[in-house]
C-alpha cells in the first residue's frame, strides 16, 4: 500500500512538472518556431526618385578588426576630484583617498580664453577624508596637479565651472521660437548608424523624427561638409545664393534673432575650422565655448589610450565625456531661452570602425537626459555626420567606398511642430529618400529662424516658386520643409562625381590603356599641387587598384572614370574621377583613403598633408 501511494505521489509530481514545463515554455517554443510572414529586407533604400536609386546591404562588408580591442580603451588614471557649483560658489570635491596628496592649482576667471592664469594656489588632501575646496564664483577653468609624499605626480586634470543661470535674468515666458541643436558624430555613415546604434534607434521610435537616407556629402572632410551649413550666406539669410567669404556664421545670425549660442568639440585641433585654428570663431561669436577648456587639457593633461594615439583622456575622463558634461551644464540655460548649439565628436570614430558600437549607450543616455529636461520639446535636433569612414580596411571595400558619401542625418523634432505646421512636417518626412545636401540644411535653418515661413500658406507659395524653376536649373539649396523635386540629380544638387552613387559603376580592367593614362594624369595632378613645396617628394604611380566607368546615360556624351591608385614613396592610396576627352580633366577633389600619420610632419596645412611625403 505504501509503495502504491509513493508511486501515485511520484506520478502526480511528474505530471505537474510536465504541465508546468509545457505551458511555461510554450510561449518560448512558439517564439522560436514562429516564422515571420515577411523577412527583413537585405537591402536598405537610400535614394528612390525617378532619376536616382541608391541602396545598400544591411550587413557590413568584410573588414579586419582593429589591432587592439576597442572595449579595453579606457582611461587608466584616477579621477580624484569633481567640479561642483553650490550656492553660487565653485568647489573641487575630493573623494576619499588612501594616501596623502599635496595639490597645486592654476585658475582662469572672467575671460577664460586668455592664455594667462588669473591666480594660483595649493591645498592638501588627507588620506581617508573627503573635502571640498572652494575655488571661486562664475565661469572658471582650473588646472590641478596633485603629488604624493615622494613628489611624484599622481593626478593632473582640468575642470570647467559653468554655474546655472541666475533666475532673475531668465525670461518669465519663453519666446515662441524653436531652438536648434546639432549633435555631430564624425565619420559615421547612415548604415554604420543602423548597425551599431540600436539603443538610439529605439529611442527615436518613441519620438517624432525623420531619417534622411539620401543625405550626401559635398566635400572631402567634415570641415568641407559643415561650412555650407554653418559658414556661408544663403538666399534668404543674406540675399545671395552662393557661399561668400564665410564671415557670416550661423552663430551670428541666430544671435541677431535673440538666440543664445554654444559650440563644443572633443578635439583641440578642431575638425571644424581646423584650417586656421579657432581664429575664425572668436569669443564674441558664441556665448558658451568649450574650446579653451579642451585646449587647456590638450596642452597640459591629455594622454593617449590607443596605439594610434587618437583617443585622449584627462585624468579618468575621455575628451568625449568632457563634451557631454559641457552639454549637460548648458541644460539650465536651454530650458529658459531659445538656443543654437553645435557639438561635434571625432575622437575614436575617425580611426576605428567598431568604436561606434561603444557610443550607442552614451548618446541614448544623453538624448534621454535632454528629453527629461524638456529640451527636446522646444528643439529641432540634428543627429548627423559629415561623411562615412574615410580611411582604413573597411573603407577599401566597395560598400565602404559608397558609405563614405552617405553620412548620417536624422532630424528630431517636438510633437507640437507636426500639429502646428502640418504641411511643413509632411514635406520634411516626404524627403526621407530624396537626394539632399548640406546646402539644403542651411535653407532649412533659415525657415527655423522665422517660423512664419512654415505656415501652410507661405509654404504653398514656396512650392509654386520651386515648381516654376526650369527642370535643369534648381536652387543649390532647398529647404527640407519643401518637397525636393523628384528630378533632382547629383549635378543639380552640386554633388561631385566622386561623391555621387546615383550613376551605375562598371568595373574596368586596371591594365586598360586609357585607365593607365588617366591614373598617371591623376598622380601628375597631385604633383602639381605639391610642387611649390620642396620638402615634399614628387610621387609616382605604383599601381592602379580599382577603376570604374561612370554611366551618365544615353542622353549625354560624357565619359568618366573613377580611379583608385597607389603611389610611392609612402604607399599613399588616392581616389578621384577623371573625365575622358581630348584633354583629361579632374572632375572631383582628390581623396586620400589611406592613413598618412607622420609621413607629412613637415607641413601644417591639413589639405597639403594628405599629399605630402616629407623628404
Image (cartoon, rainbow, N blue to C red):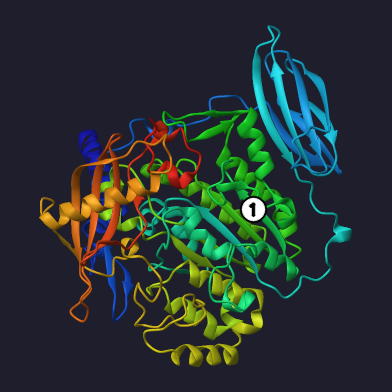
Quarter of the image with the N terminus is: top left
Compared with 273, 68 (above or below) is above
The residue at which mark 1 appears reads as: 280
Compared with 103, 310 (above or below) is below
Q: Quadrant of residue 50?
A: bottom left
Of residues 244 and 126, the one nearer the viewer is 244
Number of marks present in the image shown: 1
Is residue 208 visible from the viewing direction of this image?
A: no
Q: Residue at x 47, y 88 (%)?
A: 466
| x, y percent for residue 8 | 23, 42
Q: Residue at x 65, y 84 (%)?
A: 452
The local crowd at label 1, few if under 14, some if 14 to 19, many if 20 or more residues have their Cα within 10 Å, is some
Quarter of the image with the C terminus is: top left
Of residues 39 and 10, the one nearer the viewer is 39
Left or right of 422 in this view: 297 = right
Is residue 554 visible from the viewing direction of this image?
A: yes
Of residues 12 and 451, the one nearer the viewer is 451
| x, y percent for residue 171 | 83, 66
Q: Quadrant of residue 168?
A: bottom right
Compared with 222, 9 (above or below) is above
Compared with 96, 421 (above or below) is below
Q: Quadrant of residue 353?
A: top left
Local secondary structure at mark 1: loop
Amino acid at each position: 500500500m505504501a509503495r502504491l501511494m509513493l508511486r501515485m505521489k511520484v506520478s502526480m509530481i511528474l505530471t505537474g512538472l510536465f504541465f508546468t514545463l509545457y505551458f511555461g515554455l510554450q510561449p518560448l517554443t512558439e517564439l522560436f518556431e514562429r516564422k515571420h510572414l515577411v523577412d527583413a529586407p537585405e537591402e536598405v533604400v537610400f535614394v528612390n526618385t525617378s532619376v536616382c536609386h541608391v541602396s545598400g546591404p544591411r550587413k557590413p562588408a568584410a573588414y579586419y578588426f582593429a589591432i587592439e580591442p576597442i572595449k579595453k580603451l579606457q582611461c587608466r588614471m584616477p579621477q580624484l576630484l569633481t567640479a561642483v557649483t553650490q550656492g553660487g560658489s565653485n568647489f573641487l570635491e575630493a573623494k576619499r583617498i588612501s594616501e596623502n596628496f599635496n595639490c597645486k592649482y592654476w585658475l582662469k576667471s572672467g575671460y577664460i580664453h586668455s592664455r594667462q592664469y588669473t591666480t594660483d594656489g595649493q591645498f592638501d588632501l588627507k588620506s581617508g577624508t573627503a573635502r571640498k575646496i572652494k575655488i571661486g564664483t562664475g565661469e572658471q577653468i582650473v588646472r590641478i596637479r596633485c603629488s604624493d609624499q615622494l613628489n611624484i605626480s599622481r593626478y593632473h586634470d582640468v575642470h570647467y565651472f559653468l554655474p546655472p543661470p541666475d533666475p532673475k535674468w531668465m525670461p518669465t515666458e519663453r519666446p515662441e521660437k524653436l531652438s536648434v541643436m546639432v549633435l555631430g558624430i564624425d565619420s559615421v555613415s547612415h548604415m554604420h548608424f543602423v548597425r551599431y546604434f540600436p539603443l538610439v534607434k529605439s529611442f527615436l521610435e518613441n519620438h517624432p523624427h525623420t531619417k534622411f537616407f539620401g543625405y550626401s556629402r559635398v566635400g572631402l572632410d567634415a570641415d568641407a561638409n559643415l561650412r555650407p551649413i554653418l559658414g556661408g550666406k544663403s538666399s534668404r539669410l543674406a540675399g545671395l545664393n552662393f557661399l561668400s567669404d564665410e564671415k557670416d556664421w550661423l552663430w551670428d545670425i541666430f544671435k541677431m534673432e535673440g538666440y543664445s549660442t554654444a559650440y563644443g568639440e572633443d578635439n583641440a585641433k578642431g575638425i571644424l575650422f581646423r584650417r586656421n585654428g579657432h581664429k575664425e570663431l572668436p569669443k564674441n561669436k558664441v556665448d558658451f565655448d568649450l574650446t579653451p577648456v579642451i585646449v587647456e587639457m590638450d596642452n597640459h593633461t591629455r594622454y593617449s589610450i590607443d596605439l594610434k594615439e587618437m583617443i585622449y583622456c584627462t585624468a579618468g575622463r575621455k575628451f568625449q565625456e568632457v563634451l557631454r558634461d559641457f552639454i549637460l551644464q548648458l541644460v539650465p540655460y536651454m530650458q529658459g531661452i531659445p538656443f543654437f548649439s553645435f557639438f561635434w565628436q571625432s575622437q575614436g570614430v575617425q580611426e576605428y570602425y567598431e568604436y561606434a558600437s561603444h557610443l550607442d549607450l552614451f548618446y541614448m543616455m544623453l538624448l534621454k537626459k535632454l528629453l527629461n529636461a524638456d529640451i527636446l520639446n522646444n528643439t529641432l535636433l540634428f543627429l548627423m555626420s559629415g561623411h562615412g569612414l574615410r580611411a582604413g580596411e573597411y573603407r577599401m571595400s566597395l560598400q565602404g567606398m559608397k558609405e563614405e558619401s552617405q553620412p548620417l542625418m536624422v532630424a528630431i523634432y517636438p510633437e507640437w511642430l507636426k500639429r502646428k505646421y502640418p504641411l511643413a512636417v509632411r514635406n520634411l518626412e516626404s524627403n526621407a529618400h530624396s537626394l539632399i545636401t548640406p546646402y539644403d540644411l542651411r535653407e532649412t535653418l533659415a525657415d527655423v529662424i522665422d517660423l512664419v515661413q512654415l505656415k501652410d500658406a507661405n509654404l504653398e507659395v514656396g512650392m509654386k516658386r520651386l515648381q516654376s524653376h526650369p527642370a535643369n536649373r534648381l536652387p543649390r539649396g532647398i529647404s527640407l520643409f519643401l518637397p525636393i523635386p523628384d528630378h533632382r540629380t547629383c549635378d543639380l544638387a552640386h554633388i561631385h562625381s566622386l561623391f555621387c552613387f546615383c550613376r551605375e559603376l562598371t568595373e574596368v580592367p586596371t591594365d586598360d590603356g586609357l585607365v593607365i593614362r588617366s591614373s598617371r594624369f591623376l598622380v601628375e595632378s597631385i604633383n602639381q599641387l605639391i610642387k611649390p613645396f620642396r620638402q615634399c617628394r614628387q610621387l609616382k604611380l605604383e599601381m592602379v587598384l580599382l577603376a570604374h566607368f561612370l554611366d551618365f546615360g544615353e542622353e549625354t556624351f560624357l565619359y568618366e572614370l573613377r580611379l583608385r591608385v597607389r603611389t610611392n614613396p609612402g604607399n599613399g592610396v588616392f581616389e578621384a574621377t577623371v573625365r575622358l576627352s581630348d584633354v583629361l580633366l579632374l572632375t572631383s577633389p582628390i581623396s586620400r583613403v589611406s592613413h598618412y600619420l607622420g609621413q607629412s610632419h613637415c607641413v601644417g596645412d591639413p589639405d597639403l598633408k594628405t599629399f605630402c611625403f616629407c623628404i
